[in-house]
Image (cartoon, coloured by chain):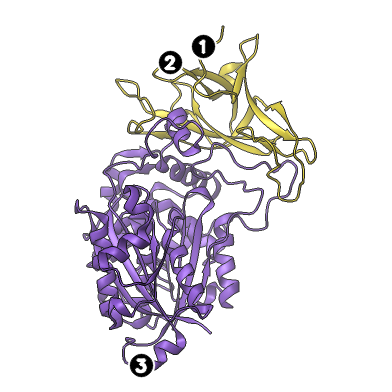
Chain colours: A purple, B yellow
Amino acid sequence: MSVRVIGVGMHPWGKWGRPFTEYGVAAARAALGDAGIAWTDVDFLVGADTIRNGYPGFVAGSTFAQALGWSGARIASCYAACASGAQAIDIARTRILAGLCDVALVVGADAAPKGFFRPVGGDRPDDPDWLRFRLLGATNPAYFALYARRRMALYGATPEDFAAVKVKNAAAGALNPDARYRKAVTAAEVAASPVVADPLRLLDICATSDGGAAVVLASEDWARRHAGRDRGPAVRIAAVSTVTPRFPNTVLEMPNFATDSSAATTPPERPFRASIAHAAYEEAGLGPGDLSLAEVYDLSTALELDWYEDIGLCGEGEAEKLLRAGDTALGGRVPVNPSGGLASFGEAVPAQAIAQVCELTRQLRGEAGPRQVEGARTGIAVNQGLFGHGSATILTR
Amino acid sequence: MDAEHAVDGWFVVDAGGDAHLLGARCAACGNVSFPRFEGFCRNPGCEGTEQEEVRLSRRGRVWSYTNAGYPPPPPYVAAEPYTPVTLAAVELAGEGLVVLGQVVPGIGVDELRVGMEMELTCGPLADGPLVWMWRPAAAAA
């Protein structure tokens, strides 16, 4: 038994200055339209929470349900940092798999402030996310930069490699009407942008954006009975992994001050990011060799390279080789971030993981237009965020 | 009397002026945590409930480093005029920990490299209170 993705919809990413609910409703309506069903056909709505939008953002499920018009649908809301959207999908999927509902709508939307993400306000010395700003001025890009510098030291990555990731993703994003940044970027432009967190420059780091994304999921039976409403080849969710790290996590993660200690215990076989993807492969019964494409969370250009290794596209320290060979560009062996990635979207946290699944779905249906990955059959979408959250979602057709 | 610390109980300055990070060590399995974690051990394979305070190694090697090209947002209080704050994540071999901290003012990223030896000290934030800081061990000799 599997769950089908029968509709996807997005509100274009940007800096629109409107309430997040508007983006979410627009995306939801687009997804319902794509599925060819009415909102009142939906049994269950899951909202991915945004923590920046106060009360209505913390109860995204009910906020979107009310905005779409109370229909009596059951709801759930969830927060899992960058993985919020994927967890929302997993909650909807498992309720369908349990036989408790047939059709579920998953919505995430955000309206992001300008500049660095900052912690929730007030004086909160018990909150590590507050303390890291207060004591160290350690922003999210600071952590991305630590990983980037380490990549340079360990594997010989260069700022030119990082810039090449931006150039690649901008070229793909220019072809995506839902992306915020839709123009080509040159390596010289990356190199001329100011340093935000050495070695990363402004154009190496993803922006913060407004946007909304939604998917409609249905049980296999329901989708079959409503044949014709599903568009193109049936797209199925083969796996959703939302595993947490295993102790001791020896990578310094946002928003922490230190790693776990490896003095008394042996570090796990796979570091956290790799374990997220591994669990999804195990669940799907697939491996990296089956992938037609991947959407990875390129919070920074350098982090995209880490992901190549974490999802098994190549061995440790070999990501630069893959990039330089053009394997991960559109038209390459296994395109990564054919949507344009966060480099072209900027992050709208609770919507982002859902947007990744929208892209996979469009690619697997063959509806991705000029950025279509030819013959796409299997795709993975991965992300990692604060507080030990991360996800990997595998879709097949 | 010590200057005010920006956070309580995370580090001490001894009579000789040396700063020490304060960790906790599980009495049962020896796992070390920083910041100090009280009560149940975070090692999922350990049932320990007693933690003893330990002073962490004052020296370690750079795991990675960066800086803040733009003033970090509140609640950080940025100095005016702003000069980029350098950060280093330093690996303490004995404890198996990597600990993030500011690097003392005046040391930029060009003076750091992965693997170099660092030493713990402390220094004031722009608005006065002390935090732990890393400095190149050679400079301290």
Dot in front, 3 or 2: 3
The residue at which mark 2 appears reads as B128
The residue at which mark 1 appears reads as B3
Nearer-the-camera pick, A193 or B24: B24
Q: Chain of mark 3?
A: A
Residue B20: x and y in percent read 63, 21
Residue B112: x and y in percent read 50, 31
Give above or below for A93 relative to A63.
Answer: below
3D distance between C-alphas at marks 3 and 2: 68 Å
State whether residue A12 appears in this view: yes
Marker count (numbered): 3
Residue A76: x and y in percent read 43, 64
Dot 2: what SS?
loop
Report whether B72 appears left or right of A237: left
Checking the image for residue A227, the label placed there is 3
Does the residue at mark 3 contact the one at mark 1 (Cβ under 8 Å)? no
State whether residue A164 appears in this view: no
Q: Residue at x 59, y 78 (%)?
A: A285
